[in-house]
Image: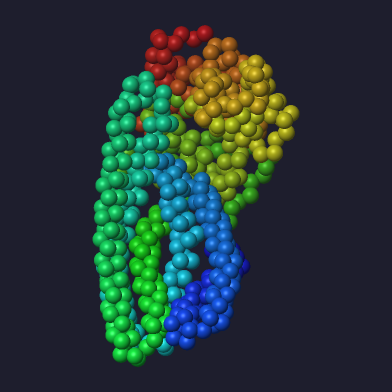
Amino acid sequence: MRPHRTAVAVASLSLLLTTAIGLAFPLVVRFLMDAAFVTRSLENLNSIAIGLLILFAIKGVFNFLEVYLLGATGERVIADLRTRLFSKLLDLSPGFFTERSSGELTSRLTSDCSTLQAVLSHQVAELFRQVLYLVGGLTLLAALHPQLMVTTAAVAPLVVLIALSFGRFLRRKSTEVQDRIADANAVAEEALSQIPIVQSFVRERWEADRYGSRIQASLRAALSRAWARGLFFGVLAFVAFGGIVIVLWQGGRLVLAGQITAGELVSFLLYAVQVAAAITALASLWGAYQQAQGAARRVFDLLDEEPEIADPPSPVLVPEAAIPEIEFRDVWFRYGPDEPWALQGVQARLRPGEVVALVGPSGAGKSTLASLLLRFWDPTRGVIAWSTRDIREVALGDLRGAIGLVPQEPTLFSGTIRENIAYGRSGATAAEIEQAARAAHADEFIERLPEGFDTLVGERGVRLSGGQRQRLAIARVVLKEPRILILDEATSSLDTESERLVEEALASLMAGRTTLIIAHRLRTVQRADRLLVLDGGRVVEEGPHDELLLRDGLYARLYRGQLIFEPAV
């Protein structure tokens, strides 16, 4: 809240003034009652009543300032927190997301932050208000009615003891509720994001039951928390207001004995009610604090998360125009300490402007090698060099900004075609976007759409065919103008004619660039300068297509096996 300290200071001053008026109210009532029942002065009665109206008018103005400023500040703080949290998530390494579901992370962005929002917008102010009422009320009681003060003060330690005993239990229950809600959100997000698969396998009822079971688990945790909160406040209400009954009894005896007036008793009663209400409210806020603490821990755990892949302390500047040479030097990698090796001692070199294809059976390590080049992970052992410098010495933005990736399954965002292509380079002009679309041969289907480049593609591009999505993904990379290309079977979703056109576009795009092709359909890599054949995480063969066929090794067997099912065209 530090950036908003001016608004917080004004709101705090308003809170002090409204609380001071609230504390003055019982004193004024005392004089009002005595004017009516003791001195029987109509003039004093009228003056006091008018004074009360003026006090409450002033209190209303400062109440508005306090509530508005703290509410607005709370909204801004949570908006900042959500932005920081989302930015933090974007900076975390891909390995982090393999261990966390997107539904759980979304829950932290939404429900956990909403819990904190309630604390900042209302409960912080209420905490200070009730502390002031408690301290001010006890002080005035001690000054005005020392005899009755002893009885009232005896209740406070008992309430504090109850609050402390229930606090930790409520915090555990609240954290459990948030965790169960996150589990339910994860199930819902997974099912909704894969709705075609769910419906094609007629698994709607199964998914509904799976979600329902998670909701029931969260309900059981919430009911347990509600039971604890109910018991907590029930005991507190009895203790606090039971103390008021005792004070009333004692005060009544003092009035009958002529030691205090009726007005003094009423003012004391109002102060006692204020003190009891403050104690009860503080206990309630303590329970809310325990609940918010669980949410805060989940949020700040993410904010404190250190990415495994980060920029070096002093990044090496790389020449913008230079096409780098990439070298893998004895690269070993596995995804976890207990996982098998995905790569084992890979030695390979990608010369500037060279087209190199990675081939091999499924699970050989082809995509892993490309992911290491993008620094989605770092090698467990060994070095990947960028023009002789370890890529870990290069700023992530420079490294990834120089690499263009066209994945096998293209990913689009739920905006327009223009926005999806422009994702490749911020600030691109309309002419540059349209030129990139032509280069990827996407313009021919875009022009047939009713709204052209302004057509909405739907979430993940569901309104477009697989081939159309692929061409937009290629156009996005064309616009980026990278120095290194990674093509993960970039033409696999295209029909024969579109594949021919896109291959022509890619051939033009690859000119003057270092290109790494991850190949599953082996007939698409015959024109690569070199092929690296991987098996079990090792490079077992290397050379041009024709030479590898003559060796009659693994590549030749894979190639002949594919020709049985997919004859060359």
Nearest the eye: 196 or 232? 232
Find residue 410 and report its horizontal and vertical position in percent.
52, 28
Nearest the eye: 347 or 2? 2
- Left or right of residue 133: residue 437: right
Residue drawn at 54 percent across, 75 percent down: 49
Find residue 398 and report its horizontal and vertical position in percent.
61, 45
In this picture, is 478 found above or below 216?
above
Residue drawn at 48 percent across, 47 percent down: 89
Q: Is residue 423 visible?
A: yes
- Left or right of residue 66: residue 292: left
- Left or right of residue 196: residue 66: right
Q: Quadrant of residue 160?
A: bottom left
Residue drawn at 56 percent across, 46 percent down: 396
Q: Is residue 306 visible?
A: no
Give the color scheme: rainbow, by chain, secondary structure or one colour: rainbow
Nearest the eye: 411 or 103? 103
How many labels, in total?
A: 0
Q: Quadrant of the N terminus?
A: bottom right
Q: Quadrant of residue 131?
A: bottom left
Residue drawn at 39 percent across, 17 percent down: 557
In this picture, is 528 found above or below 102?
above
Find residue 90 and report its horizontal and vertical position in percent.
51, 46
In this picture, is 48 found above or below 201?
below
In this picture, is 508 found above or below 337?
above
Find residue 417 and report its horizontal and vertical position in percent.
62, 27
